[in-house]
């Protein structure tokens, strides 16, 4: 790797300020800069670098993406009430969300009182937190 740890951290911060999520930052660094793994090159993960620079969002990215998907499925079901496959898909997706919330509450990344609610998820996605 041609870049030092400090240069990699600056690249991560720059990409995060441009609006990239951590997974996308890793892809950009791999494809455009030739950095295969940020952790092995700089000693820190992308999320560690972002948290040090206060660039992490309140809700983890993977959970936020699942919430976006749930909101889209709920709007689809409102229009197509008899779509049984979509209804089952929402049930599976909400189960996955609840499991992930339990994990993040246990790890301390979400407050103890955080619960999944479809209406609250819609507001969170609209805000873009």
Image: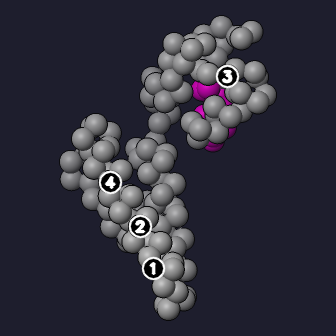
Task: Please identify the dominant SS of the magenta region.
Answer: helix
Q: Earlier in the sequence, mark 3 or mark 1?
A: 3
For the residues labelled 1 and 4, the Cα–Cα distance comes to 19 Å
Question: At 76% across and 22% down in the image, what residue appears?
Answer: 33
Q: Earlier in the sequence, mark 1 or mark 4?
A: 1
Question: At 51% across and 80% down in the image, what residue appears?
Answer: 85
Q: Which residue is mark 1?
A: 87
Q: Is residue 77 above or below residue 17?
A: below
**Magenta part of the protein: which range?**
12-20
For the residues labelled 4 and 3, the Cα–Cα distance comes to 30 Å
Q: Earlier in the sequence, mark 4 or mark 2?
A: 2
Question: At 52% across and 64% down in the image, what residue appears?
Answer: 69
**Residue nearest the observer in this picture, 87 or 13:** 87
Q: Where does the image place residue 99, in percent across and percent down from the top left?
A: 32, 54
* Image mark for residue 36: 3
Q: Where does the image place residue 59, in percent across and percent down from the top left?
A: 41, 47
Labels 1 and 4 touching (C-beta < 8 A): no
For the residues labelled 4 and 2, the Cα–Cα distance comes to 11 Å
Q: Earlier in the sequence, mark 2 or mark 1?
A: 1
Count neighbours of disc 4 (C-alpha within 10 A) and say few if under 14, some if 14 to 19, many if 20 or more.
Answer: few
Q: Quadrant of residue 120?
A: bottom left
Q: Is residue 120 above or below residue 40?
A: below
Q: Which residue is mark 4?
A: 99
**Residue nearest the observer in this picture, 65 or 92:** 92
Q: Which residue is mark 2?
A: 92
């Amino acid at each position: 790797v041609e870049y030092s740890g400090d240069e990699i951290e600056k690249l991560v911060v720059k990409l995060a300020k441009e609006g990239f999520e951590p997974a996308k930052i890793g892809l950009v660094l791999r494809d455009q800069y030739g950095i295969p793994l940020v952790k092995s090159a700089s000693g820190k993960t992308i999320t560690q670098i972002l948290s040090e620079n206060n660039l992490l969002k309140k809700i983890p990215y993977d959970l936020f993406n699942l919430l976006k998907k749930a909101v889209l499925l709920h709007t689809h079901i409102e229009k197509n009430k008899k779509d049984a496959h979509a209804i089952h898909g929402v049930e599976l997706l909400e189960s996955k969300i609840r499991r992930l919330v339990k994990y993040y509450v246990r790890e301390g990344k979400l407050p103890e009182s955080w619960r999944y609610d479809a209406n609250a998820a819609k507001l969170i996605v609209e805000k873009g937190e």
